[in-house]
Image: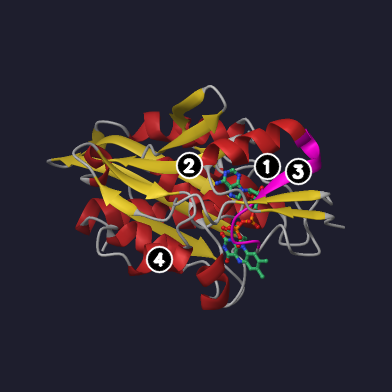
Amino acid sequence: MIKEYHAPPTLAEALAIKERLGDAAVFLAGGTEVNSAAFPSAPAHVISLQHLALTSIQPTATDLVIGACCTIQQIVDSPAVPDTIKAAAGHIFNRNIRNMATIGGQLGSNKSCSNLLPILVALDAAVDLADPAGTHAIPALEYIAGERKELITHVRIPTSALARRAAVERYARTANDISILTAAVSLTRAGENVVSPAIAAGGVAKHVIRLEPVERELDRKPLPKRDALERLVATHVAPITDIRGTAEFKQHIAGVLVAKALLRAYRDGGR
Ligand SMILES: Cc1cc2nc3c(=O)[nH]c(=O)nc-3n(C[C@H](O)[C@H](O)[C@H](O)COP(=O)(O)OP(=O)(O)OC[C@H]3O[C@@H](n4cnc5c(N)ncnc54)[C@H](O)[C@@H]3O)c2cc1C
C-alpha cells in the first residue's frame, strides 16, 4: 500500500527523492499501471512527475522531441506527430486510458504487447535519461531490453527516420482490448528495392524486439510476396504459449502482421 505521495516541483528534487528512497519509491506519471491492482510491486512511496513540465511535443532541426509526461491522447491529437505514430497511439484502448497514460509510462511499464513501443523502436527513437549527474540519451531499444528504471524526461525520434516509409499493425480479440501481438516497420525504397528495413514486434518475447535477421534478409532486394514474408517472419520469432494464444498461433499472426505492415509501407508509404 502506498504510504507517501511526493510531488516535487523540480527534476532535481524528484531525482534526490528517488536517490534517497531507492526501490521503495516509483515514479508516477498517469498512474494507469502504478494505481492498478495488477502492478507488480507495492511501492511505499510514489514520486509524481506532474510538476516537471515534461508535456511538450517539439519538432527540432534533428528530432521530434516528446516530453515523457505527454499523454497518449495528446500524441494522437498533436499536429506535430506523424500519422503512423498517431495510428500506433490510437491502438491503445480506450480514450479514458489514453487521456491518462503517458509515453514515459509506456516505456517504464515496458509491456511486451505495448502498442507504441514497436513504432518507437522501428523509428530508432532515443530516450533522455536523467540522474543526479545530468541527462544522457540512449536508444529506446536499449532501455526496453535492459529493463532499465532511470527517469525518462523526453523521447526523441530522429527527423531522418520520420522521413522513412512506416506502418503499424496489431492483433487484438476486440477493438476494445489490449493487443496480443503488435508490429511496426520502417523502410526506404530505392526503385524496387527495400533499403535498411527496421522491423519491431511485440507479444512474441518478454519485451518488444527488433527482428534483425529478417531485416538483413530483406535489405537491398525487392520485397518478397506476402506468403514468403509471413513464413520468413514466423521462422524468426519464438513466442510462448499462454492464456493469449499458442506459440504456433502467435508465430503465424506475427508473420501476418509484419508482412502486412511491410507491404503497406513498401506500396504506399504506410497509409
Ligand atoms: C485498463 C488498461 C488498459 C490498457 N490498455 C493498453 C493498450 O491498449 N495498449 C498499451 O500499449 N497499453 C495499455 N495499457 C498499459 C498502460 O496504459 C501503458 O503502459 C501506459 O502508457 C502507462 O502510462 P502511465 O503514465 O499511466 O504510467 P504509470 O502507471 O504512471 O507508470 C507505469 C510505470 O512506468 C514508470 N514510469 C512512468 N513514467 C516514467 C518516466 N518518465 N520515466 C521512467 N519511468 C516512468 C512508473 O514508475 C511505473 O513503473 C493499459 C493499462 C490499463 C490499466
Query: Residue 215 versus residue 58: which sits nearer the camera?
Result: 58
Between marks 1 and 4 in the image, the one whose residue lies nearer the viewer = 4
- Amino acid identity at mark 1: Lys
Whole-Å distance between the Cαs marked 1 and 3?
A: 24 Å
Q: Which mark is residue 179?
A: none
Whole-Å distance between the Cαs marked 4 and 2?
A: 16 Å
- Amino acid identity at mark 3: Ala
- Amino acid identity at mark 2: Thr
Q: Which mark is residue 206?
A: 1
Query: Residue 73 versus residue 244: which sits nearer the camera?
Result: 73
Residue 149 shown left or right of residue 211 in the figure? right
> Looking at the picture, how far across and down is residue 221, in whole percent?
25, 34
Instruction: Report the quarter where the N terminus lies.
Output: bottom right
- Element assignment for label 4: helix
Q: Which mark is residue 153?
A: 2
> Looking at the picture, how far across and down is residue 241, in whole percent?
75, 52
Label 3 near label 4: C-beta < 8 Å? no
Q: For disc 2, does the CB lie below 8 Å from ligand 1?
A: yes
Mark 3 residue crowding within 10 angstroms, few (<14) / some (14–19) / many (20+):
many
Figure quarter occupied by ligand 1: bottom right
Q: Which residue: 29% across, 58% down?
A: 81
Q: Which residue: 55% across, 45% down?
A: 234
Q: Mark 4 points at which residue?
A: 74
Task: Work out whether mark 1 precedes mark 3 in sequence or the reverse, and give the earlier one.
Answer: 3
Instruction: Report the quarter where the C terminus lies.
Output: bottom left
Q: For disc 1, does the CB lie below 8 Å from ligand 1?
A: no
Q: What range is drawn magenta here?
A: 21-31
Label 3 near label 1: C-beta < 8 Å? no
Mark 1 residue crowding within 10 angstroms, few (<14) / some (14–19) / many (20+):
some
Q: Name the residue under label 3.
A: 25
Between marks 4 and 3 in the image, the one whose residue lies nearer the viewer = 3
> Looking at the picture, how far across and down is residue 245, in whole percent?
71, 60
